[in-house]
Image (cartoon, rainbow, N blue to C red):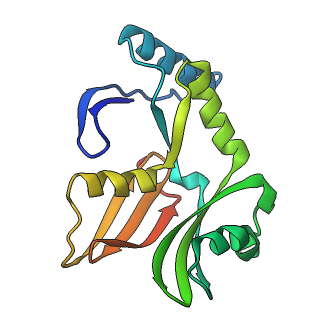
């Protein structure tokens, strides 16, 4: 958990806390919920303006090219276009988001992210039951990229690789010239 003050362009870390869910916890989600509730109460944390970063291992990342650049048109067809690349899930059971990697007037290259609705709901419910209802949900991978961007760590003159090693998932983002080019989650972590 972290508490930030200031603006999105100039955040300041005010407080943070961490814990590990014990292997022998009867209900890991209930353990997390109790920890969040206790920390929020002890530290008088505001229950509004809460953001949640979830494990990137929940997501599938796909690269997709479309023969147009219009954002409204992309929104109309994105689920249909990526459905065949996600055989592990029914398309109506996932949340789809996308980021434009490159475009011209006649083509777009996108990175598409799919996350199961049930997994997101479980994470959101843990926070909400602790009195911390998330207004925004983000993957660890995108949170890492956004944090690096806000910290001024992007180098417009070179290529970079950002890596976040989590417990069970390692998130990797590749940037070139200060622009995101690829993102993946590898199911290998620190534990």
Q: Residue furthest top?
A: 42
**Residue 24 visible in the current orientation:** no
Q: Is residue 20 left or right of residue 88?
A: left
Q: Nearer the viewer, residue 82 or 11?
A: 11
Q: Is residue 126 above or below residue 93?
A: above
Q: Nearer the viewer, residue 80 or 186?
A: 80
Q: Report the residue at 45% width, 50% height from top.
A: 140
Task: State the image coordinates of residue 51 (x, y, percent, origin top left).
Answer: 47, 36
Q: Is residue 159 above or below residue 47?
A: below
Task: State the image coordinates of residue 80 (x, y, percent, origin top left).
Answer: 76, 72
**In the rendered view of the protein, which quadrant contains the N terminus?**
top left
Q: Report the residue at 48% width, 20% height from top.
A: 47
Quadrant position of residue 181: bottom left
Task: State the image coordinates of residue 106 (x, y, percent, origin top left).
Answer: 56, 90
Q: Nearer the viewer, residue 136 or 19?
A: 136
Task: State the image coordinates of residue 137 (x, y, percent, origin top left).
Answer: 53, 43
């Amino acid at each position: 958990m972290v508490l930030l003050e200031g603006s999105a362009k100039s955040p300041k870390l005010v407080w943070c806390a961490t814990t590990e869910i014990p292997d022998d916890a009867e209900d890991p989600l209930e353990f997390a919920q109790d920890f969040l509730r206790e920390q929020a109460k002890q530290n008088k944390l505001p229950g509004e303006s809460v953001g949640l970063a979830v494990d990137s291992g929940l997501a599938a990342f796909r690269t997709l090219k479309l023969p147009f650049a219009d954002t409204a048109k992309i929104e109309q067809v994105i689920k249909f276009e990526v459905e065949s690349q996600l055989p592990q899930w029914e398309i109506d059971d996932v949340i789809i988001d996308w980021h434009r990697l490159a475009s011209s007037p006649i083509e777009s290259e996108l990175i598409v992210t799919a996350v199961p609705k049930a997994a997101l709901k479980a994470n959101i419910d843990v926070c909400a039951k602790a009195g911390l209802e998330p207004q925004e949900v983000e993957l660890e991978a995108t949170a890492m990229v956004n944090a690096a961007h806000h910290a001024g760590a992007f180098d417009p003159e070179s290529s970079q690789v950002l890596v976040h090693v989590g417990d069970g998932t390692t998130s990797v983002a590749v940037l070139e010239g200060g622009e995101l080019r690829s993102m993946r989650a590898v199911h290998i972590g620190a534990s």
